Image (spheres, rainbow, N blue to C red):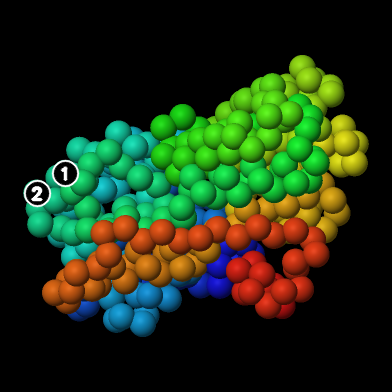
Amino acid sequence: MAVGVLSRRDALASFAGLGLAACGGRKKRAIAVIPKATSHMFWLTVQKGAFDAGREFNVDILWNGAASETDFSRQIQIMDSMVAQHVDGIALAASERNALVAAVDRASAAKIPVTVFDSGLDTDKYVSYVATDNVEAGRMGARTLIELLNGKGKVGMMMHAPGSASTMDREKGFTEALAAEAPNIKIVATQYGMSDRAKARAAAENILTAHPDIVGIFASSEPSSIGASLAIQGRGLKDQVTLVAFDASDVMIEDLRSGAIDAMIVQDAHRMGYEAVKTLVDKLNGKTPPHRLDLRAARVQLKDLNEPHVKRLLNLP
């Protein structure tokens, strides 16, 4: 199971498992997994990976996250609650690279090991950092757009949210690769989607209105990708605007099939959740997990959907 389609039944089953793990006295080690949010398919797939690791290594997974990826104050509250519960380890995907530092420091002071996953933090008080190589993934997005546009044209970038280290790295990689490798492609507009597909759609509409000659868009996250796709479809521009999206969901896969999305840069979210838990289990068992574990992203186009590794990545039948 990887980034992409996690059925509602699977999601509900996972939450049911969470309830059983959290209720009553703990008889096993407990590892808290705190995602940036719980409302996007990416995080549901991370959750599945974390629960699979919990079953394999016989630890309870306490899954809790904010509703929105921009609500880092809620993340701080959840972190402090897990420290107060004296969990055995914490895996954290920080919504903001600076705001969560003090909370991680408090966990470290309480001798609770922390693994940071998906998005980096401005601290070194963690056991492991498990994430996609996001700068390289951004470069992959740029090279894909260069190829699809034959190296020329005006493009826009739908960014995620300020302070989100993972998406900032993608945006950095995209911008740098475009400047270095495609001098005839110009970024003429950038907008934030703020982790909300409706806001992302409005932002993409603004780009398309201000720049009617735009020929491509790169979106750095799932909600920004869906918002951009909705804007392109709403204006009937599937054949005029090339969209390179990031992450995958059932909606995005259908948009790839319909031509609203031309390519997706896809993370292995299931492995990310699994490895985040595994690093903590290894640490608790006296092993030394890798300080950094980079996971590679993959480019997926319509022609790739029948490939076995893509089916695994997207959980396709």
Q: Residues within 10 Å of mark 2 (few under 14, many from 20)?
A: few
Residue 50 visible:
no
Q: Which residue is mark 2?
A: 109
Residue 220 figure quarter: top right
Image location (x, y in percent) of residue 169? 47, 40
Q: Amino acid at mark 1?
A: Asp
Report the quarter where the N terminus lies: bottom right
**Residue for point 27% across, 65% down:** 290
Task: Say which residue appears at 30% left-offset and 34% top-offset.
Answer: 98
Mark drawn on residue 213 = none
Q: Which quadrant does the C terminus fall into?
A: bottom right
Q: Where residue 267 appears, x then y in whole percent?
A: 55, 58
Q: How many marks?
A: 2
Q: Which mark is residue 105?
A: 1
Apparent side of residue 205 relative to residue 56 in the rendered image (left or right)? right
Q: Nearer the viewer, residue 65 or 187?
A: 187
Q: Nearer the viewer, residue 303 or 108?
A: 303
Residue type at numbered disc 2? Ala
Residue ID at (46%, 68%): 271
Q: Residues within 10 Å of mark 1 (few under 14, many from 20)?
A: some
Expressed as whole percent of the image width and height from the top left, the position of residue 308 reads: 68, 77
Residue nearest the viewer, comparing 88 with 156: 156
Give the image location of residue 188, x and y in percent.
69, 22
Task: Find out whether the residues at labels 2 and 1 contact each other: C-beta distance under 8 Å.
Answer: yes
Judged from the image, the secondary structure of the residue bearing numbered disc 2 is: helix
In terms of secondary structure, where does tag 1 sit? helix
Q: Residue at x 22, y 62 (%)?
A: 89
